[in-house]
Amino acid sequence: MSPLVLGILIFVCVGALGVAFVPSLAGSGRAGKRIKAMHASTSARSSAGGASRGREDRRRAVQQALNDQLKNNGRRKKRVPLQMRIYQAGMKIDKSAFIRNSFILGGVVFVICFLLGVPLLFSAVFGVAGGYLLPRWYLGQRKKRFQKAFLLELPNAVEAIVRGVKTGLPLNDSLRIVAREVKEPVRSEFAHVIDAQSMGKSTDEAVAMIYDRVPLPEVNFFVVVISVQQQSGGNLSEALTNLARVLRDRKKMQAKVKAMSSEAKASAMIIGSLPFIVAALVSFVTPDYLLPLVSSPIGYVMLGIAAIMMSIGIFIMNRMIQFDY
């Protein structure tokens, strides 16, 4: 074999060994890119898995907070004591004074009926009914006015908390600003929250007391937002901003429903007052025509039946114009 051929064979063998054991620069670059891509894919999957686990943990925390709040609300709605109903109406008297005034009112109704010539038994029935129903009707009307005034000011209070949180104030300081600067009756309710915090209650427990005194869905929304934020964290200012927008939208919906149901309410008022107007006109034209209704036992029975039927009709018409939104 010639030296030239031998040299070529040796060169080829050395080159093959170099290619086999020493990767080229281009091959090394591609291998590095593949290794980096593999590590990046692994890191991305790890990050996605961590984010997914974080979202799942937060979802579970939010769901747990909502379930706890719903359970608490269910326990609150089972039975409301008389003193709490008085507080819900925005009244400052205690339970004993309310019961005493109810007995006095019942006695006054009894005496008036007896002086008007109503038989003793019916006077006693009217007195008991007046002493029990009239104070509770008044309590219900005061409660509606109190809740209406509270809802009117609640969005402003939530927006004040949002402004405080966005400027860097802690939630407790924002609540103190609301308890000091907003209008009544929201100011008094948030002042109770501050007092409860001073007595050692946590923020979510103290805020939940507002729902005890003002049991409204809008207040429940606010309590749930604060409770979820305290338990699982999150952007409180964004959540409260959305809540304020929801509250104002619900207020607009309430005004729209009120406008659309005004015709039905007017019809209900006319139908409800028509028997009294007819009785007054008939008594004015012929005074003796309806006299047996108030001068004989059967007349009292008929008046009682008429009152029951009128009450049922008024109740049905009232339920027909009530809307949930």
Image (cartoon, rainbow, N blue to C red):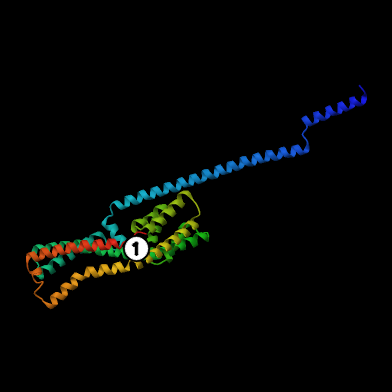
Where residue 9 appears, as percent x and y from the top left, is 86, 26
**Could you say where residue 157 lies in the image, as x and y percent from the top left?**
43, 63
Residue at the image position 19 percent from the left and 64 percent from the top: 310
The residue at the far top in this view is 1
Left or right of residue 228: residue 260: left
Label 1 secondary element: helix
Q: Is residue 7 left or right of residue 45?
A: right
In the depicted structure, whether residue 267 falls above or below residue 55: below
Hey, which quadrant is residue 151 in on the image? bottom left
Res 177 quadrant in image = bottom left
The residue at 74%/39% (across/down) is 29
Which residue occupies the foreground of this view, 79 or 185?
Answer: 79
Front-lying residue, 173 or 217: 217
Give the residue at x 39% y 47%. 67
What is the x, y in percent for residue 100? 20, 62
- Quarter of the image for residue 89 reads bottom left
- Between 279 and 57, which is closer to the camera in this rendering? 279
Looking at the rendered image, the quarter that the N terminus falls into is: top right
Q: Residues within 10 Å of mark 1 (few under 14, many from 20)?
A: many
Provide residue 291's location: percent of width, then percent of height.
9, 72
Q: Nearer the viewer, residue 164 or 293?
A: 293
Is residue 183 depicted above or below 51 in this figure? below
- Look at label 1 and name its amino acid: Gln
Asked whether residue 180 appears in the rendered view, the answer is yes
Please indicate whether residue 273 sits to the left or right of residue 64 in the image: left
- The residue at the far left in this view is 296
Q: Identify the residue position indicated by label 1 in the image.
A: 147
